[in-house]
Image (spheres, rainbow, N blue to C red):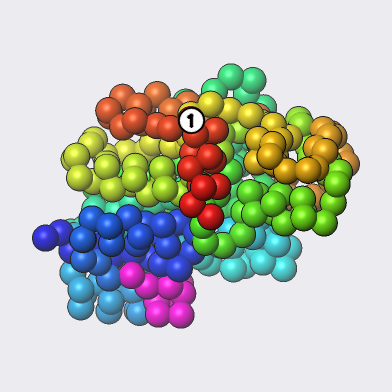
């Protein structure tokens, strides 16, 4: 049985990954930030030396994108770059494969077409810059790694856009949502399945991009989420909701490399429908 270690175990993705491994009957060691501070190199080294994992699913991340611009800037870099380097170097030392989750925010969102895996990166906010630095740390430390860039993540645990829309729809009969930012929604279930699929099927190491198939604006996403609710959803430009952190306007990433592995990717509409039934 493969020895598995998960960081960020209680986060949106880590929780989904644990559920999936539980369904499969897989054994794993899972840690949240209280159990393992990934920014503490000695603590990370000690844990890896004791457990000697063969596969590391690195789900821990600082994800408060707007806070990362100011009061959370230091934490963002400590977790997403330094913490990732600590995990990658520990994985290297014990001979483990590592799966690292990155983001569409490594791109600037000015490409009107789909971003390919090897397109030039150009992050415009602190979160994207730190996650890209995390990618570099993984590449520098390891040969046996999978970097998976994803976007617009939603799942059962934690805060996300789907829950926000459902909550607002309870108290409002009209909502406005931006219609000039485009991307691909990602169900944590699909992402967790792909993480395991890469490892189980010994796919070539390197960088992949994974979301659900199809793309949309936030307005179109919201409209689909609320199509059965008694609420009117109207489109507005991004200027209607100023945010501290720059948001890419067109961060649609190509899924070709992921699809070429043979992994079947649900459409975002089907993924959303299944998710809404579950909750």
Q: Main secondary structure of the magenta part?
A: loop
Question: Residue 220's spot in the image, x, y percent?
Answer: 69, 32
Between 45 and 260, the residue placed more toward the observer is 260
Residue 16 in the image: state x and y as whole percent. Answer: 41, 57
Of 44 and 36, nearer the camera is 36
Residue at x-position 69% and y-position 36%? 227
Judge from the rendering whether residue 4 lies leftward or rightward of residue 14; answer left or right.
Answer: left
Where is mark 1, residue-wise?
267
Under circle 1, the secondary element is loop
Badge 1: few (under 14), some or many (20 or more) residues near its Cα, within 10 Å?
some
Where does the image place residue 17, in percent across and percent down from the top left? 36, 57
Magenta segment, which residues? 30-40
Q: Is residue 50 visible?
A: yes
Q: Is 34 on the left or on the right of 227, as rendered?
A: left
Does the segment drawn in magenta span residue 100? Answer: no
Can residue 132 be seen here? no
- Res 184 quadrant in image: top right
Q: Residue furthest top?
A: 113
Q: Relative to residue 221, is residue 18 drawn left or right? A: left
Quarter of the image where the N terminus is located = bottom left
Q: Nearer the viewer, residue 15 or 240?
A: 15
- Residue that protrudes farthest toward the left in the picture: 1
């Amino acid at each position: 049985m493969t020895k598995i270690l998960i960081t960020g175990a209680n986060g949106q993705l880590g929780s989904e990954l644990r559920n999936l491994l539980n369904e499969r009957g897989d054994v794993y060691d899972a840690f949240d930030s209280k159990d393992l501070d990934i920014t503490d190199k000695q603590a990370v080294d000690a844990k890896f030396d004791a457990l000697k994992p063969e596969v590391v699913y690195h789900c821990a991340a600082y994800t408060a994108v707007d806070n990362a611009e100011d009061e959370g800037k230091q934490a963002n870099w400590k977790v997403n770059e330094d913490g990732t380097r600590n995990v990658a170097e520990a994985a290297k030392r014990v001979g483990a494969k590592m799966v690292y989750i990155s983001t569409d925010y490594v791109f600037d969102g000015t490409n009107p077409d789909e971003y390919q895996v090897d397109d030039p990166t150009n992050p415009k906010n602190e979160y994207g810059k730190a996650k890209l630095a995390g990618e570099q740390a993984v590449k520098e430390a390891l040969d046996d790694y999978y970097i998976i860039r994803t976007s617009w993540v939603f799942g059962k645990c934690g805060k996300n856009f789907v829950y926000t829309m459902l909550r607002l729809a309870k108290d409002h009969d009209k909502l406005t949502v931006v219609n000039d930012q485009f991307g691909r929604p990602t169900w944590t279930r699909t992402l967790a399945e792909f993480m395991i699929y890469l490892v189980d099927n010994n796919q070539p190491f390197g960088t992949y991009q994974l979301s659900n198939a199809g793309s949309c604006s936030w307005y179109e996403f919201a409209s689909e989420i609320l199509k059965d609710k008694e609420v009117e959803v109207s489109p507005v430009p991004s200027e209607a909701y100023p945010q501290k952190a720059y948001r890419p306007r067109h961060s649609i990433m190509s899924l070709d490399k992921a699809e070429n592995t043979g992994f079947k990717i649900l459409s975002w509409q089907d993924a959303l429908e299944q998710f809404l039934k579950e909750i």
